[in-house]
Image (cartoon, coloured by chain):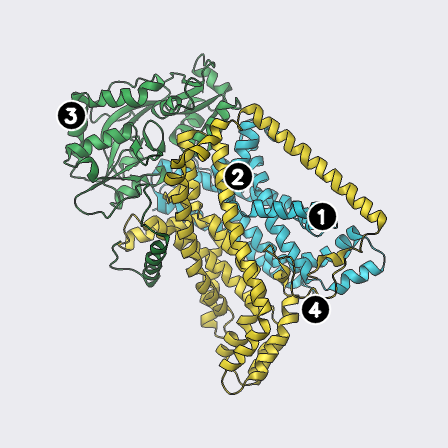
Chain colours: A green, B yellow, C cyan
Amino acid sequence: MRLRRTTTLAASLLAITLTATACGGGDDDDSGNGGGGGGDEIVIGIKFDQPGLGLLTPDGDHVGFDVDVATYIAGELGYEPDQIVFQEAPSPERENLLSRGDVDMIVATYSISEEREESVDFAGPYLLAHQDLLVRADYEVPNEEAINDMTLCSVSGSTSAANVQRDIAPDARLQQNNTYSQCLTGLENGTIDALTTDDSILAGYAAQPEHQGKFRLAGLELSDEYYGVGLPKDSENLDAVNEAITAMVEEGAWDEAVAEHFGPAGYEPEAAPEIGTRPEA
Amino acid sequence: MSNLSVLYDAPGPRARRRNVSYAVAFLAVLALGSWWLISQLQDKGELDWAKWEPFFTDSRVWTTYLLPGLQDTLVAAGLSMLIALPLGALLGIGRLSDHWWVRAPAGAIVEFFRAIPVLLLMLFANEAYALWTDVDRSVRPLYAVVTGLVLYNASVLAEVVRAGVLSLPKGQADAARAIGMRKGQTMTFVLLPQAVTAMLPALVSQLVVIVKDTALGGALLGYSELLRNANLVISNYGNVLASFAVAAAMFIALNFLLTSLASWLEGRIRRGKRSTGAALSTTMPGGMAVAGDVAGDAAGPAVGGMGPSGGGAGPSGDGPGGTGLNIP
Amino acid sequence: MFDFLDLDRYDLFGAFWTTVQLTVFSAIGSLILGTVLAAMRVSPVPIMRAFGTVYVHIFRNTPLTLIIVACSQLLAYTLGMSMGAEFATDTMSFRLAVLGFVLYTATFVCEALRSGINTVPVGQAEAARALGLGFTQVLTLIVLPQAFRAVVAPLANVLIALTKNTTVAAAIGVPEAALLMSDMVEQEAQLLPIAMLFGFGFIVLTLPTGLLLGRLSKRVAVKR
């Protein structure tokens, strides 16, 4: 807790924080909110609540494809796993986390887009995902036209939700929720037909032990989402991160991570996209 | 009218029978509703042991998610209360000031921060700390949550304090002035002590709001409070309704504890009223025993007349004025 | 700074209109349910009093987000109730949100009214009973009308809080101001200016409400 130049409010806040946490016993909890920010560690923004990509498990570990990519890149940059601090990167906060320097990079289902590239730099992409539908195992989606008659669910304010409303199926009934888990309740109970977002995210849910055999991916490629590694604007690490991603793919670590995290869902993403690929406008 | 039984006569035989039949009908509807709900949930598999099991057999659910979440909720709420209460009192008194240059800014602050959703206040605070201070990023969400809660709740508490002071009979201030007290003395020795009792229930319900509103910091700023951590349980175990039920139960228990504590405190303050008055008189300059007595006597009717006194918010059923109206 | 403000793409006024509608419908609903609850809590039937107390304790002590999301998860997604609208439409989530707001806000209305009832002098009820009025008559003809006039200011605060609380409806996808805000943030990647725009919008909505009702409360107050 460094504090140099603050208002009196912040100062009194700090004083009480110290006493309060002292009473509460133990400083921060083990959810990995980050440490001191010294020179010998790298802070990486990931998701905490996305099975298959970035999930905080009951043991307090971070598990998922994004986590593996992040760990590998950090390794190439010269950081041991115990020098990595994982911080949660909620979607609306991602640009700010980078521009403020709160995190050194973000590996959190961050798809490259023109608007975002105005405020951050992207290394990669390291994964090509497509917007897809997650349906009950016995449910058939004949073609893309049929989506217009379906009841869909997605996360509010997400790119996927906007895609559905603007391009893919403007007539479909789309329910937007806070989290994907909330949509799963409806999918499980048959009150909605499909959960729509990137197939990489969907695969994570399909592979969860609680859901195994219940859901499957429809296998539609409704959009191209290039997942990039978010870096602060004009970051000096850009080339190093790109090289790290290339090395990960060439060494086979990429394939291993894919098999480990997406395999159980029967989801095989496309081969790693070429570095520097950008979505077509 | 703190004893609400003055609203109806002591029930005779017929009224008693009617009341019993109402009660039975009401119970029947309630039972039918709950039975329907439970059977529906059973049908959908929401009551399956598998969905609830983690909370009973897997201690990691508690140690990794729920207890740290509860701790963070408590820290944020506690800090917010500690800062918002004095700040709110200050703003409230400021709004009552005779000087326009105190009154106007206090009023502007209160009205402004009451008008903006807390969530946005937290967002701005987070941004402000990031831009203009060196608060470390690991505690910044806490700072932002606390700042948002303080700004909003201090404004609301200021209004509570102002209403409490305004509710006192005008004679209180006049009497204090007549015996030569200055404005500050009038406020601190005569008005505030009486107003506090009257506004306690409203204060407490605002404290409950603080506890609940910590949940807003979780979704957007990633502050690891209880509700956000409950969402992590859901991500791992896929048991939405069960996790929500547990989280809700924890919030309800916490807030119930808070309101119970407050009503106990309220009772103590009320019982100690007389002695408070006497104690006050000794601390006042120049033999003001009379003033103490005035305050003590007037407290009764003043409190009885003030809105929330009869247990407006807390679970306290019995107000101070409920003498002689207790119909068996 | 405000170059993201593309009104063709983002229906800013439509979103705030939805916020207003949410507020109005929820306010009416909570006024009704809150009055019923308050009546229950002072009624001669013990079981109703108990129910009212338990209800208030449960709903007032739970975070609003939790109540709104639970409404949608339990009623719509699990039990398949679509509130008379087509399933998974904006209308459905709108009605679910209103239901949630009513369940929550009614507890505040109830508590405000109960404290309002406390401001009515005991003699009023005693006189009414001496005239032979029953409980319902005492309450609806004598006590409540006076109580309502005493609690205009607290109710105004509840209304302002409700207006701002409608932002929580974004959690279940009601296309109101907060949802549009998160949509714009996701698309435009500019958090702060967008949040400022919406903060201003809420000031425009809530400040006049507070001032108007504050004036009203002084006019209708019972002089004692």
What residue is at 29 percent from the left and 24 percent from the top?
A280
The residues tagged by marks 1 and 4 sit, at their Cα atoms, a distance apart of 32 Å
The answer to whether residue B214 is left or right of residue A30 is: right
Same chain for marks 2 and 1?
A: yes
Q: Nearer the viewer, mark 2 or mark 1?
A: 1
Query: Between marks 3 and 2, how big is the CA–CA gap?
Result: 47 Å
Task: Say what secondary structure mark 1 lies in.
Answer: helix
User: Which residue, given by chain and number where applicable, does mark 2 sit on?
Assistant: C68
> Mark 3 and mark 1: span between their CA atoms?
74 Å
Q: Which residue is mark 4?
A: C224
Q: Position of residue B240 (x, y in %)?
A: 47, 32
Q: Chain of mark 1?
A: C
Mark 3 residue type: Ala
| Kind of element beneath mark 3 | helix
Q: Which residue is mark 1?
A: C46
Image height of B258 relative to A196, above or below: below
Q: Quadrant of the N terminus of chain B?
A: bottom right
**Quadrant, the C terminus of chain B:** bottom right
**Subunit that carries the residue with mark 3:** A
Vertical position of residue B45 compared to residue B5: above or below:
above
**Within-10-Å neighbours for mark 1: few <14, some 14–19, many 20+:** some
Give me the C-alpha separation between circle 3 and circle 4. Answer: 83 Å
User: Which residue is label 3 attached to?
Assistant: A247
Q: Nearer the viewer, residue A64 or C207?
A: A64
Quadrant in which residue C128 is drawn: bottom right
Q: Name the residue nearer the viewer: A178 or C177.
A: A178
- Disc 3 crowd rating (10 Å Cα; few below 14, some 14-19, many 20+) is some
Q: Residue furthest front?
A: B57
Q: CA distance from mark 2 to mark 4?
A: 41 Å
Q: Residues within 10 Å of mark 4 (few under 14, many from 20)?
A: few
